[in-house]
Amino acid sequence: MWFVRLLAVGYTSRVTREQETHFSVQLAILTICRLLLNIGLRITYPFLPAFARGLNVSLAEMARLVALRSLAGLLSPVFSPVAERFGRRTALLLAMLVFSLGSLVVVARPGYWPLGITLILIAVAKVIYDPAMQAYVGDVVPYAQRGRAIAITEFSWAGALLLGAPFMGWVIQKQGWSAPFAWLAAGGLVGIGLLWLLMPPGRVALAQANSLRRMIRVVRQYPIIWITAGYIFLIMAGNEVFLINYGNWIETSFKLSLTSLGLAAGVIGSAEISGEIVAGLAVDRFGKRPIIITTGLLASLFYLGLPYTSPSLPTALVTLFLLFFVLEITIVGGIPLFTELLPQARSVLLSFSLAAAGLGRVAGALLGPLVWNRLGLPGVGLTAALITLLGSFILIRYIKESA
């Protein structure tokens, strides 16, 4: 596989070629399962108006469901001990089971609150899955090559829009607004089988067993957890202020069909996968922190420029591409940095970071419609830019490279 060669530099010195190939297969399965989770999470944004029409509710009511879903990120620290006490595979299997069963809720009973339950359970599955997956990568890949491994798993984030959005747009148009979740449930069950067969069942040996009590003690002892969480909160809040209005802006400004809307979302996916490739190749070589500082500042500039692209769809799509290209480098480049800020409590920091990301999305989902209604797209761009700049300041001032 192509990503075997990507990881080969500097990695073969620690493992045999057979172990390297086995890990590459595991990485592929982890990425595919995460792709399904991310499709379930991200299809709400381009198709928010379609869901609202299908349910006969307002966009504001749908935005509240998205905000409610994002609260699930706060549960990440609660589920963190699962991966530490019972093994990474157990946490991954639990996540995919919750995802599959949750997706079936709205399929069995289409409606506003069943959709809310489905979205919440998908979000819960993600907060279980991501820290376990990232901790596993942190366990087995040296820090010097970890940016590349993380970037590979992050292809699933871009793929959710690049591959998932066009397909799900077609599914909604042909089979109805709730049909995508039936496809996701089926894929999740396949993912469970693959994880069971290919992931190691044993626990990862740690210096100390994880527990809620220890987690509280660690959080009090190490301020870097709160600082990192604050940075991530702001980056995600700024992005959500824009994303919650994205589908409505594109649909109303350019009168796109559902299929075309899915293809437009694919532009964001293309930008993100490009950013993930660049992050995977660059952050280990040139430094994780300098790169994500630069791209975070650039993202703020593109937020400011978005309101001036509305008269032209090509200009809007180019600006969207550039925005999500630099934003994805910021996010993906930050993950390997965060995995090494507190190696002795890696899952704790990652879990709190994911909780902060969820809380940031809640704040952005609630704030975004208010800004749109009062100030329109210019206000949305300015708000997203200012929030992102504040996050970049925290990174520059308080978060340092530790390895």
Image: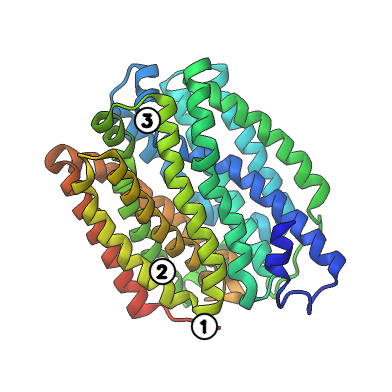
From the image, tell me which residue sits under label 1. Answer: 402
For image coordinates 38% across by 51% down, the residue present is 321
Looking at the image, can residue 212 be seen?
yes
For image coordinates 75% across by 55% down, the residue present is 26
Q: Residues within 10 Å of mark 3 (few under 14, many from 20)?
A: many
Q: Nearer the viewer, mark 2 or mark 1?
A: 1
Disc 3 to disc 2, how far (Cα)? 32 Å
Dots 2, 1 in contact, CB < 8 A: no
Instruction: Find residue 30 and report its horizontal and vertical position in percent.
Output: 68, 51
Q: How many marks?
A: 3
Horizontally, residue 188 falls left or right of residue 159, namely: right
From the image, tell me which residue sits under label 3. Answer: 48
Label 3 vs 2, first from the N-terminus: 3
Label 3 vs 1, first from the N-terminus: 3
Amino acid on which disc 1 is placed = Ser
Q: How crowded is mark 1: few (under 14 residues within 10 Å), some or many (20 or more)?
A: few
Label 2 vs 1, first from the N-terminus: 2
Rendered view: 292 above or below 41: below
Amino acid on which disc 2 is placed = Trp
In the picture, the quarter occupied by the C terminus is bottom right
Disc 2 to disc 1, how far (Cα)? 16 Å
Rendered view: 312 above or below 335: above
Q: Nearer the viewer, mark 3 or mark 1?
A: 3
Instruction: Find residue 97 and report its horizontal and vertical position in percent.
Output: 67, 37
Of residue 15 and residue 340, the one placed in the foreground of this image is 15
Choose top left, top right, bottom left or bottom right for residue 86.
Answer: bottom right
Instruction: Name the mark on residue 226.
Output: 2
